[in-house]
Amino acid sequence: MSKKRKRISRRRLAGQRVMAHVSIFHLETGQHKPVTAARRFIAEEGLNSPAILNVRRNEHTTDRFFWGEKGLFSAQYAEENHFLFPSLRVIVDHLGEDKIFAGLELTADDWEEIEEYEYAFV
């Protein structure tokens, strides 16, 4: 019996394409929890948003965080809701929606949802 493959949402795929243009930082947790290590790294380095932090917990597990203008979020949340973050919206506006979302075939429902929340944090 073959394993059913999980389908990734078009909205998350769109977010992954946008976040591909964000700088990525890799760090180890040390003796801290992953989110604490990420917050300490942001404070010590004086990082500006947007940024992605890959925090290695152990040899098997890595946690991904998105540093945005409103705080620290899981990278998955930021991918699925990329349109809520003004700094990611700037990237989309700069590169162009046609270029970033080419071939994704976002439906009318996807665009309605994005437009509904477009000014949520502005």
Image (cartoon, rainbow, N blue to C red):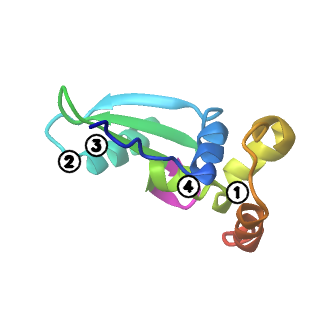
Q: Which mark is residue 29?
A: none
Circle 4 — which element? helix
Asked if residue 116 is positioned above or below residue 13 in the image, the reply reads: below
| Residue segment shown in magenta | 67-72
Q: CA distance from mark 1 to mark 2?
A: 28 Å
Circle 2 — which element? loop
**Count of picture labels:** 4
Instruction: Give the mark, 3 or 1, whose residue is nearer the N terminus.
Output: 3
Image point (49%, 39%), residue name: 52
Q: Amino acid at mark 1?
A: Pro
Q: Which residue is denoted by mark 1 in the rendering?
A: 86
Q: Is residue 26 magenta?
A: no
Asked if residue 110 is positioned above or below residue 11 in the image, the reply reads: below
Q: Are marks 1 and 2 in contact (CB under 8 Å)?
A: no
Q: Amino acid at mark 4?
A: Glu
Q: CA distance from mark 3 to mark 4?
A: 24 Å
Q: Which residue is denoted by mark 4 in the rendering?
A: 80
Asked if residue 87 is positioned above or below residue 19 in the image, the reply reads: below
